[in-house]
């Protein structure tokens, strides 16, 4: 059954989007417990931008500096499809 779904998603051009969406579920394993404790991934846009809420502005600044390494870690598991192209950090207090 899984193979049938995978083939359908590939034919429909949705395999990449499904792989991108998996980043939200896998976030704690990808970034580690410390970063996961102060962040909450929200979604991946159609252009590959990952939107992540951050607990404080200090953490946001730190994570902006770490973005290239985080993107590389996220994409190491994705192959050619489903890659994250960038991260947009959002202050959690602005998300209310």
Image (cartoon, rainbow, N blue to C red):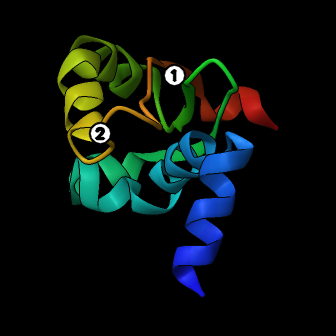
Label 1 Cα neighbours within 10 Å, binned few <14 / some 14-19 / many ≥20: many
Q: Which residue is mark 2?
A: 79
Q: Position of residue 76 (x, y in %)?
A: 20, 39
Quadrant location of the N terminus in the rendered image: bottom right
Q: Which residue is mark 1?
A: 89
Q: Circle 2 — which element? A: loop
Residues tagged 2 and 1 counted as in contact (Cβ below 8 A): no
Residue 42 in the image, given as x and y percentages of width and height? 64, 43
Mark 2 vs mark 1: in front: 2
Q: Quadrant of residue 4?
A: bottom right
Q: Kindly identify which numbered label has been placed on residue 8.
A: none
Give the percent coordinates (x, y) of residue 89: 51, 22
Of helix, strand and loop, which one carries label 1? Answer: strand
Q: Label 2: how many residues lie within 10 Å, few (<14), some (14-19) or many (20+)?
A: few
Measured Cα–Cα span from mark 2 to mark 1: 24 Å
Q: Residue at x 17, y 24 (%)?
A: 69
Q: Relative to residue 38, is residue 63 depicted above or below?
A: above
The picture places residue 94, in percent across and down from the top left corner, at 73, 26
């Amino acid at each position: 059954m899984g193979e049938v779904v995978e083939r359908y998603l590939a034919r429909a051009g949705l395999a990449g989007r499904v792989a991108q969406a998996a980043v939200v579920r896998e976030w704690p394993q990808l970034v580690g417990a410390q970063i996961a404790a102060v962040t909450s991934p929200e979604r991946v846009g159609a252009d590959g931008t990952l939107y992540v809420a951050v607990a404080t502005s200090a953490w946001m600044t730190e994570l902006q500096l770490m973005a290239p390494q985080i993107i590389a870690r996220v994409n190491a598991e994705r192959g050619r499809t489903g890659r994250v192209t960038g991260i947009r950090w959002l202050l959690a207090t602005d998300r209310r």
